[in-house]
Image (tube, rainbow, N blue to C red):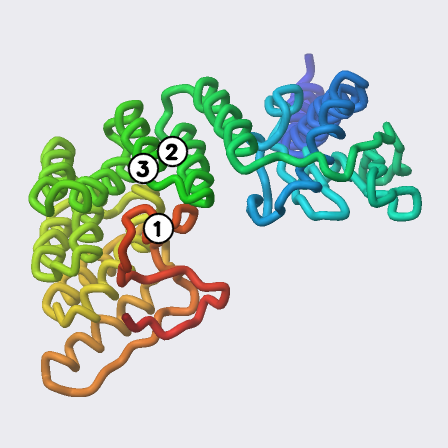
Amino acid sequence: MTRKKIIIWVCVAIGGVVLAVIAAPFIGIIMWVTVAKHQINKVEAVLQKPEVYQTVAAQMALYCQSDTNFFPEYIGAAWLPAEVRKIGYPHGRIDPEDAYLEFGGGFHHFGYRLERNKEQSSSDTNIWKLIFLSEDSDDKPLITIQVPATNHLEEAVLLGKVIEGYDSLIATAGSGEDSQEGVHQNKIQTLLRFNRIPEAREVCRDLLKRVPNDWWAVLVNALITAQEKSRPAGDAVINEWVQKQPNFFSYLDLAYYYELQSEFARASDAIIKATEYDANTDWGHGGNSEYRGYTAAMCAFHAAQYPTVIKLCNKMLQVKVNGDYAKQGFRVLKAAAEQRLRNEQADPVWASDILPFDPFENVDIEKLLQRKLERPHRKEAYNYNHSY
């Protein structure tokens, strides 16, 4: 082979490699969309089977005819019949005149809509129509059912159905901390919604048995123990766990626990201890180290623990993995703490780009503990002045 031909073949080979590298992401996207569309088609086919949609129509109609105060703004899989509980990640809304369930999301939405036909319904009988919805397709009526207007679910019966759903989800969620934690939290909040405080606390204990190293399970059980038994007993629950796996995040969990107990000096000690450990990590207990650290620092500031604030801010300013995220917030907070130490006025506003750490965003912790807690909350508006 001549030198010229060799050069040509080398250039062709290099060009092919370059094209492959350039095209690879697009090919990957096309393959992902194709597979996703295939899975969606399979789920949509299941949802259009009579044995599935007939059960859904009957249960959703009873939901609509029951006291809608029983229902949260959005219901999840545990509230749905077993036939659809395992299909994707369904969620929906229940109202007196209609209901909606969605099984898709992202680039393709699909599911059911149940409507009461007001014209055909009477004081004795409600006429309900279930419709299948699929994005970019015409609505498809599936079934029309008649339900006596007096038919509904009593509170105990409804709660029993939902708890059965949660137990089914828990049994299939595996032993992973994230999977168990989310289902248990939803079950706890549902029990709280129905004012079943002892049962909700028992679910907290069940979670700790299943995932004894889960930070959220330890935190909530320490708080419950402190409430039911004694403060020292609650302290022991979380301190023994921290000693088994001491790190930056577990000590911030300990600090948060003491903050909720209004023991600010002990919270400060836990924060100082946290600074002795590596914080240059992508993710920890509920968020990255700067996100967790900023809430701890702000709480310490409002507890007048200014040297602790400065020490934690200095620690966070050294974190590199998240770039400039939260850095300006820590600088402002550190400067404010230094001003307070000089007896100068300083009231830092919560940084607009950092949400407060709130491990009980999905669980009504005050109802669970039956007492008021002073703590930072997440707000719809990011920029708010935190005072408590």
Q: Amino acid at mark 3?
A: Pro
Q: Nearer the viewer, residue 241 or 29?
A: 241
Q: Secondary structure at mark 1?
A: helix
Dot 1 corresponds to which residue?
Answer: 367
| Left or right: 376, with 16 as reference point | left
Dot 2 corresponds to which residue?
Answer: 181
**Residue 388, x across and y down, in percent:** 27, 70
Q: Secondary structure at mark 2?
A: helix
In this view, the mark in front (2 or 1): 1
Residue in the picture at 36% in, 37% down: 200
| Left or right: 244, with 116 as reference point | left
**Residue 378, x across and y down, in percent:** 41, 60
| Left or right: 258, with 43 as reference point | left
Q: Is residue 278 visible?
A: no
- Badge 1: few (under 14), some or many (20 or more) residues near its Cα, within 10 Å? some
- Badge 3: few (under 14), some or many (20 or more) residues near its Cα, within 10 Å? few
Dot 3 corresponds to which residue?
Answer: 198
Q: Amino acid at mark 1?
A: Lys
Circles 1 and 3: CB atoms closer than 8 Å: no
